[in-house]
Image: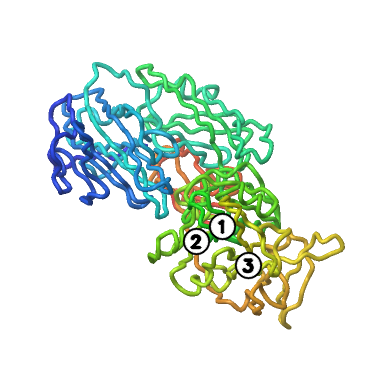
């Protein structure tokens, strides 16, 4: 991850001498320049300010969400300086009430062009973020500056805080005793920049903070996979016996990055432990790194879909203890693994277990596993994050529209597997906000973005009895989680009841078919609906083919080749609706085939080009859905 370091005349106030120490005891100004040499992207005192605890003061940062980050920047002049590093303390303070469990993530990055571009990011603290609690003691962290910052006069260090989505309050971060010093020599091991995540089932790129020693970095034996020991709440199935092995390690990007190839490949949705050993920088400093839950899983949009949501617990239980669940369905003709996927937006369910949802089957995620099993008689997987909010929890306040979406393990540039938006403050969504009733998707139409395709569950008038754990008081719950419990949206047929009914569209009208669940997706794509032709859950005849033809796209369609021009490694990134990459041909401008590369059905695919002569080439990209051509310039 190399920055573009340009010369700039946009100099800001800078610290010109080291060591530098900021203890935040000086009174803050109410401006973006809240201290000498410091800038922020907000002046809102609720989000950033000075924490005063007796005789000690510190900088506090309270982000509101993933897209509302808080930045605090320190400007430095490192002219004539080498081997610079920063040390600082971090603590947390509980923010809000008991139900506010949202974590805050902190990272540090660096710019050498006055803050125009930042890179070499380091995550600070736990992978999932810092808990919304009062920490006992502050923790000290160190951030060694990358060699590209040596001697630069317009360096900016950025502290960046962000939190997850939803209305809950995030942990308040306290930063104190920021110290920037110059070491006599390079004594810090290189750190890994950003997130370590496979780019495909067979490849992974790891970016480091400084150049690596070539001999160790290109030794495949220094990268080791083992099958992860799955935590008890994730262990729905036995882990795989197939262990990937790194068979190719190549240093790229002027020594700052390494590209790994695996054989055998990762198994989609499986969790692995990944270890680095004997990876050193040019000075011999050894990097120690272990990642316990490395996983790759990028289903196509529509491989899984939301089909039922229970959000309005009728009891007076605390929001953390309420019964809520989300049901998802597999409409494809193949098993879809869940491992590593996240359901986010109105809830926060991270890193789902290594379980597969088979064709025509449902799977349930709940906020309260004990209450769910006591009510419905079978287990569901419990998420640990925030929960769906509705009007009562806001004491009558109008709440904004919310989303539910299924995110893949590749978090940027890849479409969501499924997504829905709802607003319980407006009709007709408001009518679906009824205590003790789930809302369910009837007849599972492909276009389900409008609230008219959702109805309140009835369960043929037979409620489930739900005990909220308060004085043995019971409440009625109307819901239909899982295949066996649904009423009209899925109907079984056949001698053994293993087939399902669909309402089939023909030029002469509609008639019912009894089909194998594995064939459901092809029928939905044709314009059929799952269920009887007689009506949906609300007893109104609503055929999917009679709905509006336009659907709301999950993301824009895209096919990109980056960087372009390129020197070392090119990466093709394609939206899943264009298909998965099977084959890439590199052609000269005269049409001569220079190279042919198997891509193993990936949507993100990297390949080396540094052995190609400089010039323009054509890439012929074949997917399982079509072929596409892009230009590529090799420098």
Can see residue 564? no
Q: Reading the chain from its start, which is encountered first: label 2 or label 1? A: 1
Q: Which of label 2 and label 3 is nearer to you?
A: 3
Can see residue 557? yes
Question: Where residue 190 sits in the image (x, y, percent)?
Answer: 37, 25
Return the mark for residue 558: none
Q: Reading the chain from its start, which is encountered first: label 2 or label 3? A: 3
Camera-nearest residue between 470 and 209: 470
Mark 3 neighbour class, 10 Å CA radius: few under 14, some 14 to 19, many 20 or more: many
Judged from the image, the secondary structure of the residue bearing numbered disc 2 is: loop
Marks 2 and 3, how far apart in space?
27 Å
Which residue is the site of mark 2?
A: 554
Camera-nearest residue between 502 and 276: 502
Camera-nearest residue between 622 and 143: 143
Question: Where residue 275 sits in the image (x, y, percent)?
Answer: 52, 26
Residue with the most extreme right position:
495
State the scheme by which the image is colored: rainbow
Return the mark for residue 457: 3
Marks 1 and 3, how far apart in space?
26 Å
Return the mark for residue 301: 1
Whether residue 467 is situated above or below residue 121 in the rendered picture: below
Which residue is drawn at the image coordinates 22% and 27% (left, top)?
179
Judged from the image, the secondary structure of the residue bearing numbered disc 3 is: loop
Question: Where residue 143 sits in the image (x, y, percent)?
Answer: 31, 29
Which residue is drawn at the image coordinates 54% and 43% (left, top)?
351
Q: Which of label 1 and label 3 is nearer to you?
A: 3
């Amino acid at each position: 991850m190399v920055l573009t370091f340009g010369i700039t005349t946009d100099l800001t106030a800078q610290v010109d001498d080291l060591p530098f120490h900021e203890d935040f005891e000086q009174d803050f100004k109410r401006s973006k320049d809240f201290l000498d040499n410091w800038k922020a992207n907000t002046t809102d005192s609720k989000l950033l300010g000075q924490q005063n605890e007796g005789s000690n003061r510190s900088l506090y940062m309270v982000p509101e969400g993933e897209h509302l980050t808080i930045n605090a920047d320190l400007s430095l002049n490192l002219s004539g300086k080498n081997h610079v590093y920063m040390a600082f303390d971090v603590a947390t303070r509980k923010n809000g009430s008991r139900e506010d469990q949202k974590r805050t993530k902190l990272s540090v990055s660096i710019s050498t062009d006055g803050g125009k571009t930042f890179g070499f990011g380091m995550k600070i603290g736990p992978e999932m973020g810092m808990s919304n609690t009062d920490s006992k003691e502050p923790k000290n962290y160190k951030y060694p500056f990358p060699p590209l910052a040596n001697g630069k006069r317009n360096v900016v260090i950025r502290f960046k805080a962000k939190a997850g989505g939803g209305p809950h309050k995030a942990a308040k971060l306290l930063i104190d005793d920021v110290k920037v010093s110059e070491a006599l020599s390079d004594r810090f091991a290189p750190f890994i920049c950003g997130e370590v995540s496979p780019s495909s089932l067979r490849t992974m790129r790891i970016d480091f903070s400084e150049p690596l020693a070539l001999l160790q970095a290109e030794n495949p034996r220094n990268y080791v996979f083992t099958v992860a020991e799955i935590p008890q709440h994730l262990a729905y199935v036995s882990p795989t016996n197939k262990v990937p092995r790194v068979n190719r390690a190549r240093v790229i990007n002027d020594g700052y990055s390494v590209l790994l190839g695996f054989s055998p490949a990762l198994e989609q949705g499986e969790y692995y432990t990944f270890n680095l050993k004997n990876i050193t920088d040019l000075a011999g400093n050894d990097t120690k790194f272990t990642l316990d839950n490395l996983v790759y899983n990028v289903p196509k949009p529509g491989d899984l879909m939301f089909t039922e949501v229970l959000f309005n617990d009728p009891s007076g239980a605390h929001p953390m203890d309420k019964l809520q669940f989300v049901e998802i369905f597999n409409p494809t003709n193949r098993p879809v693994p869940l491992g590593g996927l996240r359901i986010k937006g109105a809830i926060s369910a991270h890193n789902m277990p290594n379980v597969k949802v088979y064709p025509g089957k449902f799977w349930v995620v709940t906020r309260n596993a004990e209450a769910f099993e006591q009510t419905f008689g079978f287990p569901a997987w419990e998420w640990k994050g925030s929960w769906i909010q509705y009007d009562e929890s806001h004491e009558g306040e109008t709440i904004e529209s919310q989303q539910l979406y299924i995110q893949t393990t590749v978090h940027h540039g890849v479409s969501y597997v499924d997504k829905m938006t709802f607003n319980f403050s407006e009709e007709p969504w408001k009518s679906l906000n009824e205590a003790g009733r789930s809302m369910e998707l009837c007849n599972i139409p492909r276009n389900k973005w409008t609230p008219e395709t959702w109805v309140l569950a009835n369960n043929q008038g037979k409620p489930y009895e739900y005990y909220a754990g308060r004085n043995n008081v019971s409440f009625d719950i109307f819901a239909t989680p899982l295949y066996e419990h649904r009423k009209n949206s899925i109907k079984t047929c056949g001698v053994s009841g293993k087939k399902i009914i669909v309402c089939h569209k023909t030029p002469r009208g509609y008639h019912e078919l009894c089909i194998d669940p594995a064939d459901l997706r092809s029928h939905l794509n044709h314009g059929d609906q799952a269920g009887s032709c007689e009506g949906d859950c609300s007893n109104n005849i609503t055929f999917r083919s009679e709905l509006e033809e336009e659907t709301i796209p999950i993301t824009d369609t895209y096919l990109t080749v980056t960087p372009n021009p390129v020197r070392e490694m090119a990466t093709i990134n394609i939206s899943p609706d264009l298909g998965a990459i099977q084959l890439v041909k590199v052609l000269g401008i005269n049409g001569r085939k220079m190279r042919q590369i198997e891509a193993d059905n990936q949507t993100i695919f990297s390949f080396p080009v540094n052995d190609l002569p400089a010039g323009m080439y054509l890439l012929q990209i074949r997917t399982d859905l079509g072929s596409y051509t892009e230009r590529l310039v090799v420098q």
